[in-house]
Image: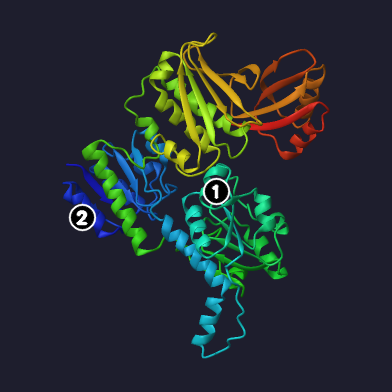
């Protein structure tokens, strides 16, 4: 009998479902790291919520642990790399708190626009002043939703019901998918410039940290209102406070903060035009019950039916992956990351051609690997072999595949193209030897690229001195060139250059390279 340890409080329904499937369950909430280490070797499954940090020490202390399950959306409190190295599945319950967070966003939106907290407080103090709190109607207002994942889409649906005009930004959602939702898809700058109210629904990452800051707020309408029910740090709190004090931002509603709990006293929290709650967007009875039931059923599906749902590291445990195909899975993921950074935003169709019988045999798994790489550069949530295709479909991307015979040059080749009538992008790759990844084609140029972490890609006029001009700038900033690939059609015409670099480039270096006559379309590629 499989034994399960639960170290955070959880709804009784979770325990009942697991026990009904003849699984042994011990509920021991509040155990410290050393206490977990002392007992974890007795268990096959560890279930946690946000309270328990599943560290490498805990993971390495067990020879029996097979599965770590998070009853919630994130896995930031679990050392996924350590678990993967040990062959332990990590799963979560994405989407369980979608409706709760969307509804809380609407609650904050209404509270902010109708001054409900301030009016409530005064009335409880015996003060009746109907004229003091002049509110703002939602009807007809433009709300900008930054991030149109599951929660953002649900917020959009509710805002439409209030008669609001919904503007949205998402780097991956297609125009067709946004139109079906009644959302006008715009750039971030257009969202900032045109919205009466802005709400953010993106994960916190290097790309989204301080997404709304002093410079962003300067682009907004005077009197704009701001909401954050996503993650602290997406909005720069000091810059938001400054904008509130100047009146640039007329009101804000926050459920999350850069530091939780925040330091007190706190000028932003105490500001009269700010509505705040203590990170309770997902804290509803229904959401907690939902994720408890969901995680129990996922565990039963795995042990009783062999079905793996919600796994964040399933790629390391795929039973049908042979040693022969493993290098091509890495190739597919690398092509996905590369393609996502050189192709336009909001593409709606990606065509993948597989040349060679080996790639044709593993077509579905290779497509999933490509999507993992592609989506990893577009969204920050959990992406794996289980959900990659679903996430692509949800964002409106259609994948078409074809299996060809052997390529004229390469025995096995993956070739990816988008269907844009303008700025169509093509990339092809293969494996040299046993496992050397090579990108052999970008658009119309034949290349020989060995992908590395940092790469500089640009178009240039094929004439003497171009390579030296770029090299001199890199040398000035002590940037070492680790590799080089050149592609051209005819002497003196457009060419393509890719440099492998030992370190990334800051904007100042990129701007200097842009000033070189004859160099265009500079891109920094990170794998």
Q: Nearer the viewer, residue 434 or 399?
A: 399
Identity of the residue drawn at 34% across and 50% down: 34
Please determine whether, in this image, residue 281 is positioned above or below residue 368. below
At mark 1, the secondary structure is helix
Please determine whether, in this image, residue 160 is positioned above or below residue 83. below
Which quadrant does the N terminus fall into?
A: top left
Position of 297 compared to 404: left or right?
left
Instruction: Give the spatial CA distance, label 1 vs label 2.
Output: 43 Å
Lower position in the chain sequence, tag 1 or tag 2:
2
Identity of the residue drawn at 45% across and 48% down: 76
Residue at the disc numbered 1: 179
At mark 2, the secondary structure is helix
Residue 331 in picture, x, y percent from top left: 50, 23
Residue 375 in picture, x, y percent from top left: 51, 37
Label 1 crowd bin: few (<14), some (14–19), many (20+), radius 10 Å: few
Res 391 → quadrant:
top left
Residue at the disc numbered 2: 16
Residue 21 in picture, x, y percent from top left: 18, 47
Res 139 → quadrant:
bottom right
Identity of the residue drawn at 49% across and 11% down: 433
């Amino acid at each position: 009998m499989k034994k399960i340890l639960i170290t955070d409080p959880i709804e009784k329904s979770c325990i009942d479902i697991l026990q009904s499937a003849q699984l042994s369950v011990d509920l021991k909430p509040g155990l410290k790291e050393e206490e977990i280490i002392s007992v974890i070797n007795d268990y096959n499954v560890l279930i946690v919520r946000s309270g328990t940090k599943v560290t490498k020490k805990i993971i390495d202390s067990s020879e029996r642990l097979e599965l770590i399950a998070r009853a919630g959306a994130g896995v930031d409190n679990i050392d996924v790399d350590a678990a993967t190295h040990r062959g332990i599945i990590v799963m979560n319950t994405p989407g369980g708190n979608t409706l709760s967070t969307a509804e809380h966003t609407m609650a904050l939106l209404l509270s902010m626009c109708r001054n409900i907290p301030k009016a409530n407080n005064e009335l409880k103090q015996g003060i009746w002043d109907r004229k003091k709190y002049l509110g703002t109607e939602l009807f007809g207002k433009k709300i900008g939703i930054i991030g149109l994942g599951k929660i953002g889409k649900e917020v959009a649906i509710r805002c439409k019901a209030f008669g609001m005009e919904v503007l949205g930004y998402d780097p991956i959602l297609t125009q067709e998918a946004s139109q079906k939702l009644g959302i006008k898809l715009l750039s971030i700058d257009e969202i900032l410039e045109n919205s009466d109210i802005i709400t953010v629904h993106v994960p916190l990452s290097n790309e989204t940290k301080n997404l709304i800051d002093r410079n962003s707020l300067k682009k907004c309408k005077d009197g704009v209102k701001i909401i954050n029910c996503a993650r602290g740090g997406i909005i720069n709190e000091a810059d938001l406070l400054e904008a509130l004090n100047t009146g640039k931002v007329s009101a804000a509603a926050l459920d999350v903060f850069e530091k939780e709990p925040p330091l007190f006293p706190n000028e932003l929290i105490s500001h009269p035009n700010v509505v705040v709650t203590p990170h309770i967007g997902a804290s509803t009875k229904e959401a907690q019950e939902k994720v408890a039931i969901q995680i129990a059923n996922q565990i039963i599906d795995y042990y009783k039916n062999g079905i793996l749902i919600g796994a964040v590291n399933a790629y390391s445990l795929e039973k049908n992956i042979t040693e022969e195909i493993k290098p091509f899975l890495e190739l597919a993921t690398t092509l996905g990351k590369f393609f996502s950074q050189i192709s336009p935003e909001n593409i709606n169709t990606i065509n993948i051609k597989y040349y060679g019988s080996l790639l044709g045999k593993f077509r579905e798994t290779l497509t999933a690997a490509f999507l993992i790489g592609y989506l990893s550069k577009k969204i920050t949530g959990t992406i794996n072999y289980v959900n990659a295709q679903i996430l692509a479909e949800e964002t409106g991307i259609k994948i078409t595949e074809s299996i060809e015979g052997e390529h004229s040059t390469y025995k096995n080749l993956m070739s990816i193209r988008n269907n844009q009538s303008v700025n169509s992008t093509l990339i092809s790759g293969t494996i040299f030897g046993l496992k050397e990844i090579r990108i052999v084609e970008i658009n119309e140029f034949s290349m020989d690229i060995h992908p590395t972490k940092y790469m500089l890609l640009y178009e240039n006029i094929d004439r003497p001195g171009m390579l030296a001009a770029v090299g001199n700038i890199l040398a000035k900033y002590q940037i070492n060139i680790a590799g080089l690939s050149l592609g051209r059609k005819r002497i003196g015409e457009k060419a393509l250059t890719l440099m492998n670099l030992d370190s990334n480039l800051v904007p100042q270096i990129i701007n200097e390279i842009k000033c070189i006559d004859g160099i265009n379309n500079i891109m920094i590629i990170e794998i």
